Image: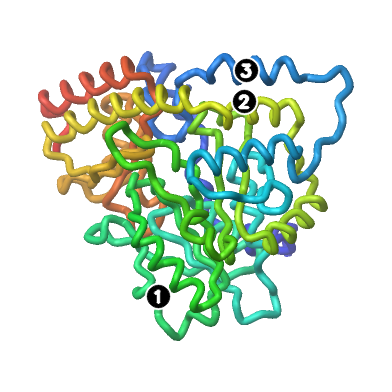
């Protein structure tokens, strides 16, 4: 027996996390004088707005002390004001909002709060394609992941009628994400109402990842939140996850908040206190500035819309099918038929052009005929790399 045999078997069984920085690959290509265009990790290159950086710097105290685990009241009140302004609903800053270090840690930890090892309800539904942390958090909390493949013909919208009726008494919660990562799909309000009604009928908790709710293009309706759908029920059985990472160019700050059912959030606050996950006060001050302003969000969205316009035109020219989207900064495409798999396609593009894409199977085993392109390089860099890609197609080095 080795030491590994005595370790956490759930952890050992997890697949490697596919959404990480690719510094090793970049270094190898750059050593060959090949410029790398990285469209993998959702980490945009647009600078963090100056007023946010200023708020952080000005609030670094001479004496560093432990922050509140649930976030300062000022931050929570600011988040509640954003909810009021953005969603036109009231929420209690005292017991219906908790600060988080980005959304990932809260997404990972929430199954530890809602799952009971002695209960029949140990199943959590995860969408496919979907953010891998949904499933990982469930597994490492001792839960049972239930993968729900989202269908192209339904525009990647979850349909509760696809869940077997005999399983509903075993389901503790369901993960949803709209606007959707990785496809960019947007859900309609009546579809959300249908899902919420189904969840309430079966006492299933809705865990709604809404990190991209402010990332949509001008001329389109603003995406809805499950906070709106459940507000008349005082957010019963709903927890929504929000983040400043993409909205405000603050991926490295690790700042967000969760909101919803006060009963569930009270338990999460207790869990968080034991884990010790307080957000540093100076980051909270920067977050207060970010949530208080929408002008920078609109300006950033204009840039992402321009990027989307460029890549959509490129894919249309080359008859590569991608899902239309007016939100997020992700492009979800189909692998051309001349390639056996998503990895073969992605590797060919990388070797030939220096362009790094994410294989669809990172987001679920059923997605091995897809790829994701995160529009993180600048507009100029995207224009440059698309010209390189087009030249390789024209020369026959890349087959479609």
Give the quarter of the figure containing the C terminus: top left
Which one is earlier in the sequence, the residue at label 2 or at label 1? 1
Mark 3 sits on what residue?
Answer: 53
Asked which quadrant contains residue 76, the reply is top right
Vertical order, 337 against 190 (above or below):
above
Distance Cα–Cα, label 1 vs label 3: 46 Å
Of tags 3 and 2, the one toward the viewer is 2
151 sits left or right of 214 in the view: left
Is residue 24 among the parts visible in the rendering? no
Vertical order, 311 against 203 (above or below):
above
Q: How many marks?
A: 3
Mark 1 sits on what residue?
Answer: 163
Count neighbours of disc 1 (C-alpha within 10 A) and say few if under 14, some if 14 to 19, many if 20 or more: few
Residue 297: x, y in percent? Answer: 45, 27
Q: Could you say which is closer to the camera, residue 296 or residue 317?
A: 296
SS class of the residue under badge 1?
A: loop
Vertical order, 64 against 316 (above or below):
above
Report if the CB atoms under discs 1 and 3 are less than 8 Å apart.
no
Is residue 124 among the parts visible in the rendering? yes
Mark 2 sits on what residue?
Answer: 289
Which one is earlier in the sequence, the residue at label 1 or at label 3? 3
SS class of the residue under badge 3?
A: helix
Q: Could you say which is closer to the camera, residue 9 or residue 233?
A: 233
């Amino acid at each position: 027996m080795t030491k590994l045999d005595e370790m956490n078997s759930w952890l050992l069984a997890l697949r490697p996390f596919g959404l990480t920085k690719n510094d090793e690959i970049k270094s190898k290509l750059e050593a060959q004088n090949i410029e790398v265009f990285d469209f993998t990790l959702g980490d945009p290159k647009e600078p963090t707005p100056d007023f946010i950086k200023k708020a952080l710097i000005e609030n670094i105290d001479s004496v560093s002390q432990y922050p509140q685990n649930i976030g300062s009241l000022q931050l929570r009140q600011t988040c509640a004001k954003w909810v009021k302004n953005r969603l036109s609903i009231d929420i209690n800053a005292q017991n219906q909002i908790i600060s988080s270090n980005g959304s990932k840690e809260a997404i990972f930890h929430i199954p530890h709060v809602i799952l009971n090892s002695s209960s029949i309800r140990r199943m959590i539904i995860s969408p496919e394609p979907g953010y891998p942390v949904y499933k990982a958090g469930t597994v490492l909390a001792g839960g049972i992941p239930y993968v729900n493949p989202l269908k192209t013909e339904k525009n990647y919208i979850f349909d509760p009628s696809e869940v077997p009726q005999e399983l509903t008494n075993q389901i503790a919660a369901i993960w949803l994400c709209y606007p959707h990562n990785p496809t960019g799909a947007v859900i309609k309000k009546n579809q959300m109402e249908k899902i919420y009604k189904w969840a309430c009928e079966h006492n299933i908790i809705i865990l709604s990842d809404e990190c991209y709710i402010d990332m949509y293009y001008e001329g389109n309706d603003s995406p809805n939140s499950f906070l709106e759908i459940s507000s008349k029920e005082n957010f019963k059985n709903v927890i929504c996850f929000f983040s400043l990472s993409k909205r405000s160019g603050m991926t490295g700050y690790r700042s967000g908040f969760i909101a919803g059912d006060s009963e569930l959030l009270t338990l999460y606050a207790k869990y968080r206190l034991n884990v010790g996950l307080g957000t540093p006060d100076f980051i909270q001050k920067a977050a207060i500035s970010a949530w208080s302003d929408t002008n920078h969000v609109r300006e950033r969205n204009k840039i992402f819309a321009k990027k989307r316009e460029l890549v959509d035109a490129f894919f249309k020219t080359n008859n590569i099918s991608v899902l239309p989207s007016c939100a997020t900064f992700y492009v979800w495409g189909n692998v051309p038929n001349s390639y056996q798999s998503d990895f073969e396609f992605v590797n060919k593009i990388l070797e030939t052009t220096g362009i790094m894409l994410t294989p669809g199977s990172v987001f679920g085993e059923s997605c091995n005929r897809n790829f994701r392109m995160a529009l993180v390089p600048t507009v100029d860099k995207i224009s440059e790399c698309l010209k390189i890609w087009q030249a390789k197609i024209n020369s026959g080095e890349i087959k479609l």
